Image (cartoon, rainbow, N blue to C red):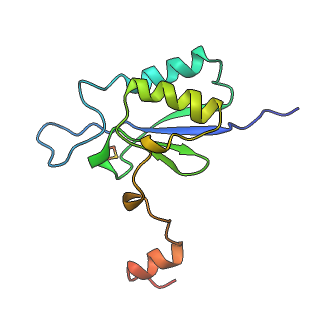
Amino acid sequence: MGFPQPAFYMFKCEFQAPPGFPKPSCVNAQNQDIFNHLSGKLMEKGLMATVLPIRTSCLNRCQLGPVMLIEPGHFMYVGLTKEKIDEIIEKHIIAGTPIEEYLIDKEFWDEPMSAKDAMRMAGVQA
Ligand code: FES
């Protein structure tokens, strides 16, 4: 058997806006240990061989933070807390059932646009 690829990637937004920044960001003094909590929980559950937690920069849904994208499937979780992280690991990762009520509203997470449509919108020739 080869070296297995991860079954899940958990992209946690770790962007922290500098003081005075005009928009909110996902990390502040009160919630800055969420990522460590996530990693610790995955370790405790023995999941590190198949779940890759990743610190990422802004995922462009700053008003709804803290946010985390789980792949595969484009599952965008918003308004995260440590308790929600624990539940997401139990239900989404281990049991295979995403938690609808913690996911972003469809209004802010519509179907993806094709590369060609994005280029057309940007006025770039395909
Ligand atoms: S700062 Fe987290 S989505 Fe923008």
Please state, as top left, top right, bottom left or bottom right, where the N terminus lies in the image. top right
Position of residue 86 in the picture relative to residue 62 (left or right): right
Residue at screen point 37% across, 61% down? 107
Residue at screen point 32% across, 25% down? 32
Residue furthest right in the image: 1
* Residue 84 position by quadrant: top left
Q: Position of residue 24 (x, y in %)?
A: 21, 43
Residue at screen point 44% across, 82% down? 120
In the image, residue 99 sits, relative to residue 84, either above or below, namely below
In the image, residue 19 sits, relative to residue 61, either above or below, namely above
Q: How many marks?
A: 0
Position of residue 74 in the picture relative to residue 56 (left or right): right
Position of residue 89 in the picture relative to residue 7 (left or right): left
Q: Quadrant of ligand 1?
A: top left
* Residue 34 position by quadrant: top left
Q: Position of residue 13 (x, y in %)?
A: 39, 40
In the image, residue 38 sits, relative to residue 59, either above or below, namely above
Q: Position of residue 65 (x, y in %)?
A: 32, 41
Residue furthest front in the image: 101
Between 15 and 61, the one lying in front of the other is 61
Q: Position of residue 117 (x, y in %)?
A: 48, 78
Residue furthest top in the image: 44
